[in-house]
Image (cartoon, rainbow, N blue to C red):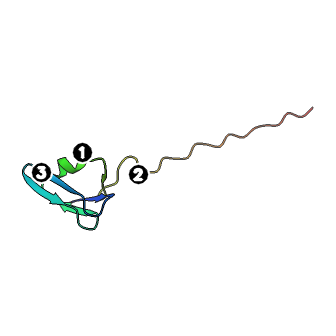
Amino acid sequence: MAEFKSKYPELGFYVGDAFKSFKNGVFKTDDVDEIKVLSELVDVTRIDKPTEEAVPKPAAKKQTRKSSAK
């Protein structure tokens, strides 16, 4: 089951001729057409699976500076 979160609590959208809407900012569905439409909306994010952006990247190595002694 795909779960989506909206910036707006009662966001509405159309799938074909059918009107669908979020309840309390959340929408759950198994319908392939609904998932396709929701994936294209700007104000909606899918929360049931981690996205590539949400996966933490390994930290870069800290470069140390050697001081020159004169």
Q: Left of 18 or right of it: where is 51?
A: right
Circle 1 residues within 10 Å: few <14, some 14–19, many ≥20 = few
Q: Which of the pair 13/69 is nearer the observer?
A: 13
Q: Is residue 37 visible?
A: yes
Left or right of 66, for residue 54: left
Residue, x 48% and y 47% (percent of image)?
57
Q: 15 or 29: nearer the eye?
A: 15
Sooner in the amino-acid sequence: mark 2 or mark 1: 1
Q: Earlier in the sequence, mark 3 or mark 2?
A: 3
Which labelled disc corresponds to residue 57? none
Q: Amino acid at mark 1?
A: Glu
Compared with 23, 12 (above or below) is above
Quarter occupied by the C terminus: top right
Q: CA distance from mark 2 to mark 1?
A: 18 Å
Percent position of residue 33, x then y? 12, 49
The residue identified by callout 2 is 54
Estimate the spatial distance between the alpha carbons at disc 3 and disc 2, rounded to whole Å. 28 Å
Mark 3 residue type = Val
Marks 3/2 in contact by CB < 8 Å: the verdict is no
Residue at (26% x, 47% y) in the render: 41
- Per the model, the C-alpha gap separating discs 1 and 3 is 12 Å
**Residue 4 spot, x, y in % from top left:** 26, 58
Where residue 51 appears, as percent x and y from the top left, is 35, 50
Mark 1 and mark 3 residues within 8 Å of each other at the beta carbon: no
Q: What residue sits right under mark 3 in the picture?
A: 15
| Nearer-N-terminus badge (1/3) | 3
Q: Is 21 located above or below residue 41 in the figure?
A: below
Element under label 1? Answer: helix
Residue that mark 1 sits on? 40
Query: Residue at 12% across / 51% down in the picture?
Result: 15
